[in-house]
Image (cartoon, rainbow, N blue to C red):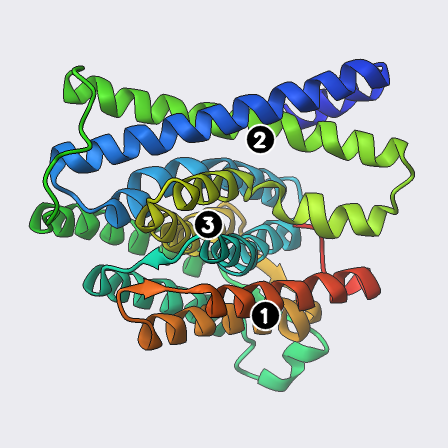
Amino acid sequence: MEAWLETLFGELHWSLLGLVIVVSLYVLGKAADWLVDEAVEVSERSNIPKTVIGATIVSLGTTTPEVAVSVLASLEGAPGLALGNAVGSVICDTGLILGIAALIAPLPLDRSIVNRQGWIQFFAGVALVLFAVPWAQPMSAFTAGGRLPQWVGIAFLAALGVYLVQSIRWARQETVETPNELAHDDAPTWLVILKLVGAVAIVVFSAQVLIPAVDEAATRFSIPESIIAATLVAFGTSLPELVTSVTAARRGHGELAVGNVVGADILNVLFVSGAAAAATPGGLIADSHFFAVLFPVMLFVLLVFRIGIFLSGKEMRRPFGYVLLGAYGVYLIVSFLFPDLTPAV
């Protein structure tokens, strides 16, 4: 669909292109409001914490397009792009999105849940790096790169199944301490869940329309391709997580924002890179640039988030948001100055 949209937008008059951008932004914002409402409704009705809802249902829906992009890229002979999509999304989710959400409002932390899910998030990122290292000659990774083997992709998918099953078990054990005062929809629960899925689908679809439209507009205004690649392309597939987390934080449901980011990071490793590697007999290529730039930045933002959870009480406050945004800013600067070091994701 992306190629078709790029062709379509390339033929539109600038006024119609501007209208597409405005309408897409409006729909994206309204759909995000709807998504947050329905996610909170599901949480209140089921007595499942919003962090868990964000880390499972919402993040699974918002990362599905990234899986499709990565698997398609690997099947079309671009396994490096597939891995770049997964790693770049983790950097964007944790650095940019969580950083912005923390600046908007303090993010409530259910420490038991965030610690549990957060350690899975951290070790998933570490596992991705370790399995990509050529252990026969580990230092060659910085010159010749490495590879994520197909068997690791299959193992990641198996781990994803275990994670989802265990998340369901944990969800059944967790209860929300606050009363169900936010429940306001008279519809049956199955319909509320269906509306939540529909809201996720609209967020994802409107984001997929918006990005190529903005990309085309940027090209017409002669914005350098390297800047487009490091900004629009870099967080394009993470836009659903961005708008969902920002909306949740703005409306006082920071737990949903945290859960969405943590769950999306886990799925980017186990689902996105796992599915892409499993679909590629030769595995996913991690060239030297991954070890020089992408992997270190990814591990740094994940470590900062872990430290933030350790040092925070019941809320993650603005200082950690600044640090996370600073890490993402360094990544962007490297992207601008050395575009060849950071493959488009």
Question: SS of the residue at dot 3?
Answer: helix
Contact flag, marks 1 and 3 (Cβ < 8 Å) = no
Q: Amino acid at mark 1?
A: Val
Pinpoint residue 164: horizontal percent, then vertical percent. Answer: 25, 47
Residue behind mark 2: 207
Which quarter of the figure has residue 214?
Answer: top right
Query: With 95 as the anchor, is 179 left or right in this view?
Result: left
* Frontmost residue, 278 versus 8: 8
Query: With 171 as the anchor, is 136 left or right in this view?
Result: right
In the rendered image, the quadrant that contains the N terminus is: top right
Q: Amino acid at mark 3?
A: Ala
Residue behind mark 3: 278
Please give the name of the residue rendered at 67% of the width and 22% of the height, measured from the top-left corner: 22
Residue 137 visible: no
Measure the alpha-carbon separation of dots 3 and 2. Answer: 27 Å
Label 3 Cα neighbours within 10 Å, binned few <14 / some 14-19 / many ≥20: many
Query: With 71 as the anchor, is 122 left or right in this view?
Result: left
Contact flag, marks 2 and 1 (Cβ < 8 Å) = no
In the image, residue 141 above or below residue 248: below
Q: Can you tell which mark lies on residue 297?
A: 1
Q: Amino acid at mark 2?
A: Ala
Pinpoint residue 313: horizontal percent, then vertical percent. Answer: 28, 70
Pinpoint residue 84: horizontal percent, then vertical percent. Answer: 62, 55
Mark earlier in primary sequence (1, 3):
3
Give the mark toward the camera: 3 or 2.
2
In the image, residue 68 above or below residue 142: above
